[in-house]
């Protein structure tokens, strides 16, 4: 069964450092998403991406964040200068149509010290 | 009113019981609704989509009530393995989904 994969599973970084979280969506999917979940809190939408551009972003997704699809398979989330409050699980998801089911990757746990 | 609301629970039920959760949403233009299951520190896993006519998958039944703006999930014959947090997701526009905070279910032996 096709699945979304994410690397690394856990990333520890120091405040102010840049991090890149990587995702490989399901191969025939066209819509890609990033979510985050702070421990004990709800899953929060960050950004959606379709046709090589951002479709929608939340107020959390400020200038410190960027997304890219550098090749035909990877989808990345970059945080330019991490803050303590960026510590969370970051989930990538993909779907084959805009309002269809989204399938989530296993997540990257980001710890900012 | 919050965009998507769920009773956080926990709902503690004995094995074999029937349990139901609701999820209310505020955007009357929402068209897509889903139930996900999330185990501790894991990713949300799609449980089922919620269609206007309602849908059933084994022991799970999902329904949509557009007039009152809520979706429901019914689990029959609860198993220990059903213990998890159940998240509802509702679309806002074409490219954005809002998740509820989740309802925790504990099925007791």
Image: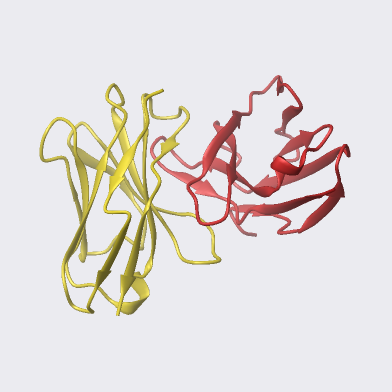
Chain colours: A yellow, B red
Q: Is residue B68 left or right of residue B97?
A: right
The image shows residue B41, relative to residue B32, as above or below, that is below
Q: Position of residue A61 (x, y in %)?
A: 30, 60
Residue A106 seen from this side: yes
The residue under the point 74% across, 51% down is B105
Left or right: A29 as drawn, with respect to A40: left
Residue B10 percent location from the top left of the image? 76, 58
Q: Which quadrant would residue B73 be assigned to in this image?
A: top right
Q: Compared with residue B57, is residue B2 higher up or lower down, i.e. above or below? A: below
Question: Which residue occupies the extreme left position in the image?
Answer: A70
- The quarter of the picture where residue B80 lies is top right
Residue name at image x 60 percent, y 57 percent: B101
Indicate the quadrant containing the N terminus of chain B: top left, top right, bottom left or bottom right: bottom right
Q: Is residue B30 visible?
A: no
Residue drawn at x 61%, y 58% as measured from the top left: B2
- Decide if residue B17 is on the left or right side of residue B25: right
Q: Position of residue B33 (x, y in %)?
A: 58, 34
Report x, y in % for residue A40: 55, 66
Indicate whether A82 appears above or below A68.
below
Number of numbered tags placed on the structure image: 0
Q: Nearer the viewer, residue B38 or A62?
A: B38
């Amino acid at each position: 069964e096709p699945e979304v994969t994410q690397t690394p599973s856990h990333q520890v970084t120091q405040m102010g450092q840049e991090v890149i979280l990587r995702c490989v969506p399901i191969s025939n999917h066209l819509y890609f998403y990033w979510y985050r979940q702070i421990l004990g809190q709800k899953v929060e939408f960050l950004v959606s991406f379709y046709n090589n551009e951002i479709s929608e972003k939340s107020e959390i997704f400020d200038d410190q964040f960027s997304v890219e699809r550098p090749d035909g398979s990877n989808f990345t989330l970059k945080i330019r200068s991490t803050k303590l409050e960026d510590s969370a699980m970051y989930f990538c998801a993909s779907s084959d149509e805009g309002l269809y089911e989204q399938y989530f990757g296993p997540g990257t746990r980001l710890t900012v010290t | 009113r919050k965009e998507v609301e769920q009773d956080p629970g926990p709902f503690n039920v004995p094995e074999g019981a029937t349990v139901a959760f609701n999820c209310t949403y505020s955007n009357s233009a929402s068209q897509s609704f889903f139930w996900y299951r999330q185990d501790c520190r894991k990713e949300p896993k799609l449980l089922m989509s919620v269609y206007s006519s309602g849908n059933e998958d084994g022991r799970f039944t999902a329904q949509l009530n557009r007039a009152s703006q809520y979706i429901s999930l019914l689990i029959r014959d609860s198993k220990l393995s059903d213990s998890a947090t159940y998240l509802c997701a509702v679309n806002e526009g074409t490219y954005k989904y809002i998740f509820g905070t989740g309802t925790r279910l504990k099925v007791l032996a």
